[in-house]
Amino acid sequence: MKCKKCGANDAEVYLAYSNLKLCPECFMLLAERKVRNTIETYKMLSKNDNIGIAVSGGKDSATLAYILSRSFEKIPMTLIYIDLGIPDYSQHCLEKVKELSKIIDRDLIVYSLEKELGFRIPDFKSTIYGRKMCSACGTVKRYLFNKITYDLGLTKIATGHNLDDTVEAIFNSYMEGNVGALVRLKPVLPKTHPKMMPKIKPLICLTDMECLLYATYRNLPIRMLECQFAKRSRTIRRKEVLNLLADKIPSFKHTFISSHYRRILPLLEKALGGQSVGDEMGIFDCPVCGMPTSLRSMPCHFCKIVSLLKRKA
Amino acid sequence: MKCKKCGANDAEVYLAYSNLKLCPECFMLLAERKVRNTIETYKMLSKNDNIGIAVSGGKDSATLAYILSRSFEKIPMTLIYIDLGIPDYSQHCLEKVKELSKIIDRDLIVYSLEKELGFRIPDFKSTIYGRKMCSACGTVKRYLFNKITYDLGLTKIATGHNLDDTVEAIFNSYMEGNVGALVRLKPVLPKTHPKMMPKIKPLICLTDMECLLYATYRNLPIRMLECQFAKRSRTIRRKEVLNLLADKIPSFKHTFISSHYRRILPLLEKALGGQSVGDEMGIFDCPVCGMPTSLRSMPCHFCKIVSLLKRKA
């Protein structure tokens, strides 16, 4: 198979959405260029930045950390890993991010849930979150990545959310008519509260498969274990369904997201009165931890779910 | 299988989206109630109406005409059939609508493209519409159903667009970011020009399968032939894809459309400045035929495509 870019005869990547056959080298260059273009288009980075990169041991955050650190060598970056205390899995992932940190020569901060807060994600198993562990885990991670970035005095946090993650989330929000979630699902979330750190998603232009291929071709250290709680989660099943769609309509993910950001989202934001996300939803200080929350006069989602564990103990 | 409604042991319809097993009789009552509810919710009919029902010989318009005429006996209704001049197919469909007209005891108007305008749909085969015959046919039918309704002095036109048709159209418009089309895809389109007749879609609550089952159980005369031009059309393929989605997420169609109408559409309309569809797009008189068009100082879509035929002759 001939590479469409360099003409070499070792094309082994086929990108159906653009009908492009590429050799590994040209594919990697394309992926990197796409990420740099995304960063430029959405003005994700500036030269005074000092960013945190949320890493998990997975293909997406490894790809993210590698491309960012190579493409923006002068920008200070710190990898942030949260040890969730999931048996075998968390230790395995920690080893991968340690390796990654060495390869790209950037500092790694390891935050242990158990050491810092005295609980582990599996502790939610016996709470009302027992059947939606990914939801509890997501709340914990979102809260802590923001708080750690803030405590470290960094300027923003980059996460490995890719195209598939974003299409899945936007598709769900359309299905649920959840306009609040829709306007928050943006490539860049600005600072809407002194303790709400800006968030950027530079991988929003790459599919799940592209991130996996990139990490594999670059030989990046990525986890080989599945989280015991994530198996067959709703997100995973929903992504499979959207992949069925993409099998039939190869451009589906790219067209859908581009139409959403270019045509629909601006109108939704206009209808909400040109308010920023924070204004629209209301943003308050959590009476327990002092961090920002959308809930008025109530503990934030993080404090609420953590209190479930305390009550139990 | 036991019917969930009446308890009889002859349930043979399974509605996955609401996990309901029904006997034929209870299914038909449910379908009729849904249509009546839709008509009530969207205020589709009033006692002074004198409506046209667009019929094609297919399952949807047969179901529509039957339910409307039985549920609203006092409202004058006329079936309108356009003979498109498609060999075998159009004659076959005409026989079915004649039977239907007798069964429900409502007048039938037959409008022959060939007799009235001197062309037939197959004539588009040799034009630039040769590979998108359904598009040309759709333009002709939309234009003529409106014009015939206007010329007959009727108050509005009811069409058999069902849930699957609507989900497919809305889904496409989202994918294409076609906001103009999105705000026009409503259960009721009001009169936005003296010659633009109001349109209602009472079957928007029933799936393709429900319409087929209803027409079959009621033993309504429906066509057994496929249109030679519609085979594997984009609409049909797109519907198959959305059915894959519905196989995995049974509530998909209902949730998607309900979220769209309740949450997203009102915001899109608000963003467009509370303008009506006509205002938003601009509505003008066609310089050729005098009927309404969204094109300024240009022949309407109908006149444009018909002129292709004339040029050829």
Image (tube, coloured by chain):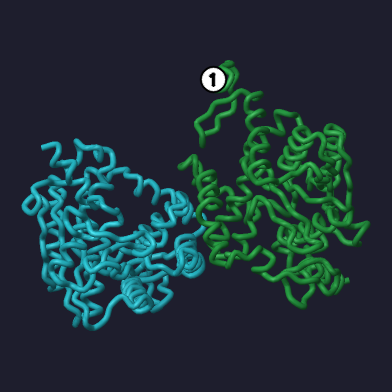
Chain colours: A green, B cyan
At horizontal 32% and vertical 67% (from top left) the residue drawn is B189
Given residues A245 and A24, the one toward you in this image is A24
Given residues B85 and B297, the one toward you in this image is B297
Outermost residue to the left: B115
Res. B79 image quadrant: bottom left
Left or right of residue B278, residue B158 in this image: left
Given residues B52 and B86, the one toward you in this image is B52
At horizontal 34% and vertical 78% (from top left) the residue drawn is B43
At horizontal 68% and vertical 33% (from top left) the residue drawn is A32
At horizontal 63% and vertical 28% (from top left) the residue drawn is A27
The tally of labels here is: 1
Please say if B220 is above or below A150. Answer: below
Pointer 1 local density, CA inside 10 Å: few below 14, some 14–19, many at least 20 = some
Task: Identify the subunit bearing mark 1.
Answer: A
Residue A197: percent from the left, percent from the top?
A: 78, 56
Please say if B9 is above or below B171. Answer: below
Residue A151: percent from the left, percent from the top?
A: 88, 56
Viewer can see residue B243: no
Outermost residue to the front: B297
